[in-house]
């Protein structure tokens, strides 16, 4: 055989060996990416305690022969593979109640979901050979911390296939660790994550696989710490939402207690009843869809809320019961007033009846109100009785006014004569003329009611002008006033004479300060003297 032929034969042998290995690595890679937990061994693994040949991904066919039965005493039993731990379900959180929605803290901006880390490649045969070996009839051993541990037996296959089988078991664990790391990176709910870590630790502790177990355990340690941190964050968020929900429930209870604590005599029952119903609906919504607050908190808040509603309902029933009694009494009192008003409606004693109607109106205003419906009906009856009376009186007054129309003409003529007296120049003549007008005014008689006030006010204006003129004349001729005026004149004249002497002395001495003071005092006294002299001239 030539060297070239030997080289080709060697290459072919290597190709035949490498192909199954490469295909096996691809299969393990696909298994890791799909988060496949384990590859189930054939049933006879469970039956005989040894690993049966698995289907070759490279060849696509099973081995032609079944593995021979192995004596239990001689075989190293491969433990049955455990079912994969279920992926934790996402925790379903109850929707917050409408009452607490506004009070809740705004959620922090969602962290960008990290892109999934590339799935680690399945352990190659070369890598697996670092941590395990195969000897005898498929017996596989794991090297860890310098010691070897038997992991199981896979008889009837090549050493590479046996080693690859147990390496895949470790790859499945690594795939689950990677999945946990990705879930932590994306801030997924931490529910049951720690249980998965514990389950994976237990699987690694069984030592029934081949791979870098210590590295995987270290990754699990790091994952456990990250899960703990994630749980702390979730707990903080949960506590914040719970605190907001508790505050919202407290606000509902506090408002209900405030409403129930109002004075029943001052409360607006319609508005307050509607608000209390709204609070009850908010409570039911929060109870049904809000976050749980714990039995102790919810029971305590519910007892307070129920007590507030009970007090409110009791006050409302008592108020409306008393209101019914008050309405009945008010209705009876006003019906009595209506009876009196209806009896007066046919009276022709206009003055007396009008006074009685004023009294009845005062009593009506002082009476308590009945219900709105009853009070409106009672008022309509009372008003109707008044209208009958005042309509009759108005008709009678209109007849009288027609009779008094001629008297109005006479008095308007007398007013023209009275106004000619003004302004008063001769007091005696003005008084005589006014008295003549007054005498004829009385003889003229009554005028229509609508004109009475205007006519009387016009005559009163003339009378006031004559009276004022008479008072002014008396003031001017009063001896006492004249005497006081003359005395004031004498005193001012004496003071002015003295100030003139002081001014002359100051000018002679050249004392400017005294000169200025004497002049100012002299000017003031002279102004007073001029004013009093004008008043005296008016009195003379």
Image (cartoon, rainbow, N blue to C red):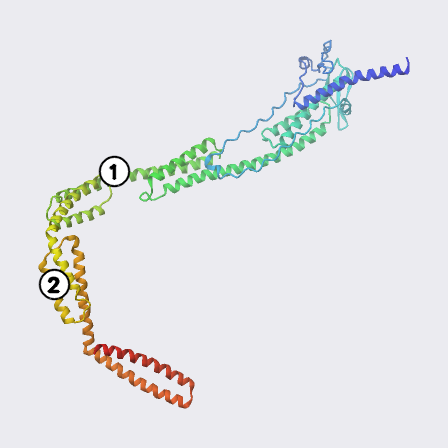
The image shows residue 501 at horizontal and vertical percentages of 34, 88
Q: Which x, y percent locates residue 533? A: 26, 80
Asked if residue 38 can be seen in this view, the reply is yes
Residue 22 horizontal/vertical position (percent): 75, 20
Q: Residue at x 11, y 54 (%)?
A: 406
| 503 sits left or right of 245 in the view | left
- In the displayed orientation, state which residue is furthest to the bottom: 508
**Left of 264 or right of it: where is 220?**
right
Viewer-proximal residue, 422 or 44? Answer: 422
Compared across the picture, whether 535 is left or right of 427 comes to right
In the picture, the disc for residue 438 is 2
Give the Cα distance between marks 1 and 2. 57 Å
Residue at mark 1? 373
Give the quadrant of the N terminus: top right
* 191 w.r.t. 502: above or below: above
Task: Assess disc 1: are there few (<14), some (14-19) or many (≥20) residues with their C-alpha within 10 Å of its C-alpha.
Answer: few
Assess disc 2: are there few (<14), some (14-19) or many (≥20) residues with their C-alpha within 10 Å of its C-alpha: some
x and y percentages locating residue 441 in the rendered image: 11, 60
Mark 2 element type: helix
Q: Name above or below for residue 256 compared with residue 351.
A: above
Can you tell which quarter of the image residue 188 is in? top right
């Amino acid at each position: 055989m030539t060297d070239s032929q030997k080289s080709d034969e060697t290459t072919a042998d290597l190709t035949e060996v490498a192909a199954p290995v490469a295909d096996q690595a691809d299969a393990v890679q696909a298994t890791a990416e799909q988060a496949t937990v384990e590859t189930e061994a054939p049933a006879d693994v469970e039956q005989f305690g040894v690993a049966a040949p698995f289907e070759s991904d490279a060849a696509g066919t099973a081995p032609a022969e079944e593995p021979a039965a192995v004596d239990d005493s001689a075989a190293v039993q491969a433990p049955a593979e455990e079912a994969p731990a279920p992926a934790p379900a996402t925790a379903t959180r109850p929707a917050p109640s409408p009452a607490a929605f506004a009070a809740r803290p705004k959620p922090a901006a969602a962290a960008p979901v990290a892109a999934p880390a590339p799935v680690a490649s399945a352990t190659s045969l070369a890598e697996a050979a670092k941590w395990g070996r195969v000897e005898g009839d498929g017996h596989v051993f794991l090297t860890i911390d310098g010691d070897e541990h038997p992991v199981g037996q896979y008889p009837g296959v090549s050493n590479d296939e046996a080693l690859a089988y147990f390496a895949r078991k470790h790859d499945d664990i690594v795939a689950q660790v990677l999945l946990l790391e990705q879930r932590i990176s994306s801030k997924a709910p931490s529910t049951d994550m720690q249980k998965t870590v514990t389950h994976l630790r237990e699987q690694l502790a069984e030592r029934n696989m081949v791979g870098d177990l210590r590295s995987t355990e270290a990754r699990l340690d790091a994952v456990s710490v990250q899960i703990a941190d994630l749980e702390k964050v979730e707990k903080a968020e949960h506590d914040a939402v719970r605190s907001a929900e508790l505050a919202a429930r407290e606000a509902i209870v506090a408002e209900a207690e405030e409403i129930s604590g109002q004075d029943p005599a001052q409360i607006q029952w319609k508005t307050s009843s509607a608000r209390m119903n709204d609070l009850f609906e908010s409570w039911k919504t929060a109870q049904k869809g809000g976050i749980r607050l714990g039995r102790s908190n919810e029971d305590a808040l519910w007892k307070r809320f129920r007590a507030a509603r009970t007090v409110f309902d009791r006050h409302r029933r008592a108020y409306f019961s008393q209101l019914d009694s008050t309405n009945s009494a008010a209705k009876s009192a006003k019906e009595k007033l209506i009876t009196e008003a209806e009896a007066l409606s046919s009276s022709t004693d206009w003055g007396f009846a009008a006074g009685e109607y004023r009294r009845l109106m005062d009593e009506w205003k002082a009476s308590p109100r009945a219900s709105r419906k009853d009070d409106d009906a009672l008022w309509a009856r009372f008003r109707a009785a008044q209208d009958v009376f005042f309509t009759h009186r108005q008709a009678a007054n209109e007849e009288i006014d027609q009779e008094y129309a001629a008297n109005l003409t006479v008095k308007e003529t007398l007013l023209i004569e009275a106004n000619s007296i003004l302004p008063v120049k001769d007091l005696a003549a003005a008084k005589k003329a006014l008295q003549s007008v007054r005498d004829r005014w009385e003889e003229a008689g009554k005028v229509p009611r609508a004109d009475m006030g205007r006519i009387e006010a016009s005559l009163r204006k003339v009378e006031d002008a004559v009276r004022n003129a008479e008072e002014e004349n008396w003031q001017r001729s009063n001896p006492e006033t004249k005497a006081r005026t003359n005395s004031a004149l004498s005193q001012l004249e004496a003071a002015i004479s003295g100030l003139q002497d002081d001014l002359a002395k100051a000018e002679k001495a050249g004392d400017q300060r005294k000169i200025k003071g004497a002049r100012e005092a002299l000017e003031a006294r002279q102004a007073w003297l001029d004013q009093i002299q004008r008043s005296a001239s008016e009195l003379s």
